[in-house]
């Protein structure tokens, strides 16, 4: 009987000790947590529209000495980013440069056009057009003139040029999304 008494005494003591440990371990610790919604960034876009995409800006047949022809094209920064624009103008075939001239003007402000290039036909090369904000549009006028001094040797000749309007991203920036945050030193 002695064995039975010790099991009867030890079992309740062990159960009480276990319950006490559980009671002390639960509810006695403070805890805290916080979270943020998914932080995200979205890349901007760099696109443009050309009012005469895939077409010529100007055409004229049967030019005679002293004749000029002009055409206009509207280039628009349709992206969400600012863009540094340029035009590359190159002759594909040409009449001698001494008798055919070309003038490219930014006519966005019609009252005060800005000359981008004026000189020999097809020799403009690359010309900077400046930095444009998203949505900004510019109207360019291209004028070609056959000199009054063009002689008989120029009869029947053809000239053509291509224009590539290019936009590249403007300078990268660092943006502080939190007005209280400290901006890291550069």
Image: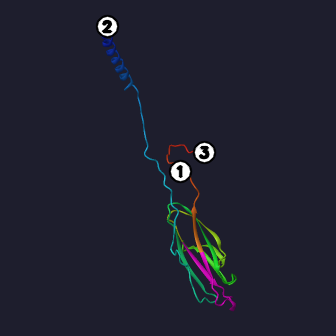
Q: Is residue 151 visible?
A: no
Quadrant (top left/top right/bottom left/bottom right) for the N terminus? top left
- At x 33% / y 16%, what residue is drawn? 11
- Circle nearer the N terminus (2, 3): 2
Question: Closest to the observer: 103 or 113?
Answer: 103
- In this image, 119 relative to 49: left or right? right
Q: Are marks 3 and 1 in contact (CB under 8 Å)?
A: no
Structural distance between the alpha carbons of marks 2 and 1:
82 Å
Mark 2 or 1, which is nearer the eye? 2
Which dot marks residue 185? 3
179, above or below 81, in the image: above
Q: Residue at x 64, y 75 (%)?
A: 90
**What span is colored magenta in the figure?**
139-162
Q: Is residue 42 magenta?
A: no
Tell me which corner region of the image, top left, top right, bottom left or bottom right, holds residue 127: bottom right
Instruction: Please say whether residue 153 is one of the residues in the magenta stretch.
Output: yes
Label 1 sits on residue: 175
Mark 3: few/some/many CA within 10 Å (<14, 14-19, 20+): few
Q: Is residue 151 left or right of residue 56?
A: right
The answer to whether marks 2 and 1 mark residues whose Cβ atoms lie closer than 8 Å is no
Numbered disc 3: secondary structure = loop
First in sequence, mark 2 or 1: give its number: 2
Q: How far is mark 2 from mark 3, CA to CA?
A: 81 Å
Q: Is residue 92 left or right of residue 22?
A: right
The residue pinned by badge 2 equals 2
Quadrant hosting residue 158:
bottom right
């Amino acid at each position: 009987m002695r064995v039975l008494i010790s099991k009867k005494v030890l079992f309740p003591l062990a159960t009480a000790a276990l319950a006490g440990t559980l009671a002390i371990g639960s509810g006695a610790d403070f805890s805290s947590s916080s979270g943020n919604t998914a932080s995200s960034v979205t890349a901007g876009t760099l696109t443009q529209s050309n009012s005469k995409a895939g077409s010529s800006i100007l055409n004229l047949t049967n030019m005679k000495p002293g004749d000029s022809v002009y055409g206009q094209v509207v280039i628009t920064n349709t992206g969400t980013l600012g863009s540094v624009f340029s035009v590359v103008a190159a002759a594909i075939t040409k009449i001698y440069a001494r008798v055919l001239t070309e003038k490219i003007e930014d006519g966005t402000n019609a009252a005060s056009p800005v000359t981008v290039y004026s000189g020999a036909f097809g020799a403009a090369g690359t010309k900077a057009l400046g930095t444009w904000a998203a949505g900004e549009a510019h109207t360019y006028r291209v004028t070609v003139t056959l000199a009054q001094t063009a002689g008989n040797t120029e009869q029947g000749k053809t000239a053509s040029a291509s224009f590539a309007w290019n936009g590249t991203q403007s300078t990268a920036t660092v943006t502080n999304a939190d007005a209280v945050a400290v901006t890291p030193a550069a």
